[in-house]
Amino acid sequence: MPWWSWILLWVALIAVSLLCYVLLGVRLFRKFMATVRELSEAGEALGHRPHLREHADDDGGAPADVFGAAVFASPEQMRHDYVTAKASRREVRRQKRVKRKAERGQPQSLHDIEFS
């Protein structure tokens, strides 16, 4: 094998390895930019989050009058609020289930239609 073939072999190996490094670098850069884009979108979504007072009773729960009021309220009052909110959420879920089953023509549970 002539001496210049070794030079060609090493030049080809170095060129291929540099090409692989460049392709890996481009791929890594694209993934990094996609991650930064997703983080900025998440930051914007969290930055424009609606306040708790405006949407507190959307799920059927009691509206939040003052943030942190539970710290100064009595345990009995907080227990009562918890139980009533839980019952309200349960009733909303039951009504949605009855409506969904009625729309689909499925048989209703006797417990759901308050027969028992």
Image (cartoon, grey):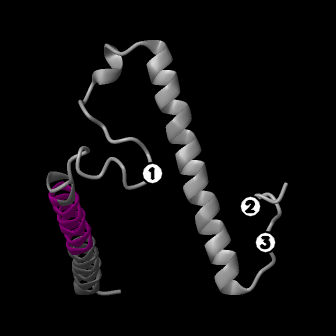
**Residue drawn at x 30%, y 37% as measured from the top left:** 64
Q: Which residues, given as a range, are shown in magenta?
A: 25-44
- Secondary element under disc 3, as helix, strand or loop, is loop
Circle 1 packing at 10 Å, graded few (<14), some (14-19), many (20+), is some
Q: Quadrant of the N terminus?
A: bottom left
**Residue drawn at x 79%, y 57% as measured from the top left:** 111
Q: Image check: 102 left or right of 5?
A: right
Circle 2 packing at 10 Å, graded few (<14), some (14-19), many (20+), is some
Q: Main secondary structure of the magenta part?
A: helix
User: Residue 32: image x %, image y %?
Assistant: 22, 63
Work out whether 39 lies above or below 89.
below
Q: Amino acid at mark 3?
A: Gln
Residue closer to the observer: 52 or 90 = 90
Circle nearer the N terminus (1, 3): 1
Q: In the rendered image, which residue does mark 1 sit on?
A: 60
**Residue drawn at x 64%, y 59% as measured from the top left:** 94
**Residue drawn at x 21%, y 72% as measured from the top left:** 30
Q: Quadrant of the C terminus?
A: bottom right
Spatial separation of the CA atoms under disc 2 and disc 1 = 18 Å
Please check the rendered image and state whether residue 29 is part of the magenta-colored stretch, yes or no: yes
Work out whether 36 lies above or below 21.
above
Q: In the rendered image, which residue does mark 2 sit on?
A: 112
Label at residue 108: 3
Q: Could you tell me if the residues under marks 2 and 3 are in contact, i.e. CB atoms within 8 Å?
A: yes
- Corner quadrant of residue 87: top right
User: Residue 37: image x %, image y %?
Assistant: 18, 66
Q: Amino acid at mark 2?
A: Asp
Label at residue 34: none
Spatial separation of the CA atoms under disc 1 and disc 3 = 23 Å
Residue closer to the observer: 49 or 94 = 94
User: Residue 82: image x %, image y %?
Assistant: 50, 31
Work out whether 103 lies above or below 40.
below
